[in-house]
Image (cartoon, rainbow, N blue to C red):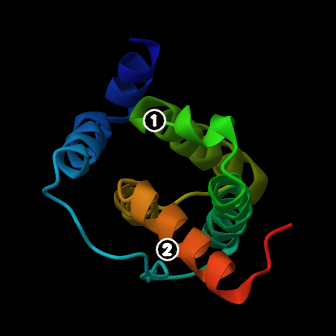
Amino acid sequence: MVMAAKLRLRGRGWAFVGVLLGWATGLAGAAAAPITWDKKGAFEACLETSLDKWLSIQAQLQVNEDPAAAKLDDAAVAAWTIETIDRCRAVAQAADAASEDRFAKHMAQWRHHIYDLAADIRRKGQSD
């Protein structure tokens, strides 16, 4: 409920929720790929760095079969996405609406990103 209110304030929130729900029902099934930005500045760099760290942690939880991995859900990822956008906006002292939308759409496929990275880790045998 709080997340929906926060998303509504942005004006793009319901679109983001729709993307998440679409993915959750199997409508969005693309494999993990890097984010292609229209422009790349401090805001986008912050988003990428945050995402890389978060994905690494989540993939390690999967590889190690940590019970915490099973607790991650769409709502938690949506909240993390919003917090990360807000934090990066403050750090960069700027933001770009197109980059926010692109990041949100990328995060809507979070399971694919985590599972692909976990598969790479398993293949390489480099789990921490």
Residue type indicated by callout 2: Asp
Q: Percent x, y for residue 92?
A: 73, 59
Residue under numbered circle 2: 116
Give SS at disc 1: loop
Relative to 80, residue 61 above or below: below
Type of amino acid under label 1: Asp
Sort mark 1 into few (<14), some (14-19) or many (20+) by Cα contacts within 10 Å.
Answer: few
Q: At x 38% / y 26%, what residue is drawn?
A: 9
Q: Residue at x 65, y 54 (%)?
A: 58
Checking the image for residue 73, the label placed there is: 1
In the image shown, does 79 or 23 lie closer to the viewer? 23
Q: CA distance from mark 1 to mark 2?
A: 17 Å
* Residue 11, horizontal then vertical, whole percent: 29, 35
Q: Residue furthest bottom?
A: 124
Is 24 left or right of 63, judged from the image as shown?
left
Left/right of residue 30 with respect to residue 57 in the rendered view = left
SS of the residue under disc 2: helix
How packed mark 2 is, by other alpha carbons closer than 10 Å (few <14, some 14-19, many 20 or more), is some
Q: Position of residue 97 (x, y in %)?
A: 41, 57
Residue 83, x across and y down, in percent? 61, 38
**Mark 1 or 2 closer to N-term?**
1
Q: Quadrant of residue 69?
A: top right
Find residue 36 and name its label.
none
Image height of 120 relative to 66, above or below: below
